[in-house]
Image: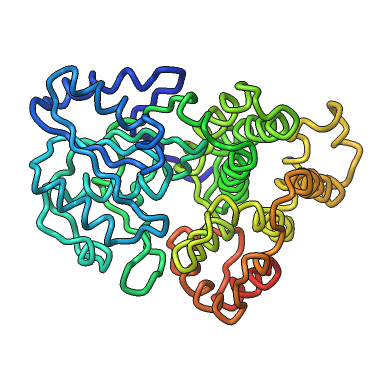
Amino acid sequence: MADFQFSIRPRIWIGPDSLLRLPLFAGEFGVENRAILIADPLLHESGVSGRVSSLLEDRGVKVLLFDEIPERASTRAAEDALRLTRGSKSAFVIGLGGQKTLMIARTAACLGRDRLDVDAFVDGAAVTAPPLPLVEIPSSLRHGFMCEDAIILADARDRRARLMRSAGAPPAAVLIDPNLSTGLSAKMAASCVIDGLMGAIESYISARSNFLSDHVLEKAIEFLAKALTIIIARPDDPSARADAWKGSFLAGIGQGSSAPGMGRAVSLAINAKHGIPKASLAAIILPYSMELGAKSRIEKIARIASLLGDEPAGAHEERTQAEAASKAIEWLRTRLGLLKVPSRLKDFDLNLDDLVETARDAREFDFMNWLPRAVSVDDVFDFVKTAY
């Protein structure tokens, strides 16, 4: 077998009220005066940001709130957050929200002690100072880059999605509290679960996958598929959120040991350029990504059919791999039909000509080098046309 190396960062807590552990980190990091909370604006309106702030302020830590994050946030929002972090001399960063917000918080923590501006960082300048301690509190039922040294931002200069890697990017800790996602509508929760499922499936079929990621991602797919089925049938069932977070946690570990794929790259590129939510894009793209995966890793797409919990044990052994792979894709499309979500990129009034640049941007992500087979920009555009 090939050489295998494994390490994991950050420390992760999952469970109701895991949020209450936050003050312990302030003491561990020696934070005695000031912290900055970078939060999704909607969580401020719902009172969640206030609750997080009070946990620290009750222990004498002054918390500055930054929630000026527009719907189409870019490097400009990250620069504003960084400026406030430096200007306030904050010693501790908390990110609260979805991926967009967490990536802005990562930027502020990674560059907080450095002199680089965000544009220089995006252009490839190296970070030389140690990062500020960062605790991430995700709220959207998925966090695929949880265990990676990645920061993904939309460049305000050209609206291109940029991926930067730095040793200071990963958080010190992640607190996953399922109670924070109860405000999501059933349709949005289902779309977020599908987004997590895309990360798990694409990492499962990646050329970088290994024996550890395979075992972890198979269990992630099981949890996420179960969560999706429950959300569709019983939207208010709290077990769906619990299963979704278990699957998301495992998917994050698996992706960190493997690599995401074509669908993730395309969704990030379209989101940055056109502002369409990544979860909505995942619901469109994932079936096509699975069809593409079946052309080179059919044994794994076939294996997924037995992980979806929609057939009696041993049934997959009676089918050919092609039949099993088709069954897995059919399972997903059936649930997408029940959700009544858009099924084509053109449903968002996108112009196909504008998506040529999207294909270029998607191909530039470094993890695209780990697809089951090598692809060019033209290949990526062919994939986009299929989903269009």
Of 138 and 378, nearer the camera is 138
Q: Is residue 203 visible?
A: yes
Q: Work out which quarter of the rendered image holds the N terminus and state it.
A: top right
Q: How is the image coloured?
A: rainbow
Identity of the residue furthest to the right in this view: 318
Can residue 307 be seen here? The reply is no
Is residue 279 depicted above or below 271 in this figure?
above
Counting the numbered discs, the total is 0
x, y percent for residue 237: 65, 23
Q: Quadrant location of the C terminus?
A: bottom right
Residue 326 in the figure: left or right of residue 17:
right
Residue at image coords 27%, 36%: 94
Where residue 225 sits in the image (x, y, percent)? 68, 35
- Of 14 and 80, nearer the camera is 80
Q: Quadrant of residue 197?
A: top right
Residue at image coords 45%, 35%: 139
Return the residue found at the far bottom.
Answer: 353
- Give 29 or 4, whichever is nearer the viewer: 29
The quarter of the displayed image where residue 13 is located = top left
Residue 49 vs 16, above or below: the answer is below
Q: How far from the left and from the top, in percent, is residue 226? A: 69, 30
Left or right of 164? Residue 83 is left
Where does residue 105 sit, x and y in percent of width and height?
Answer: 28, 45
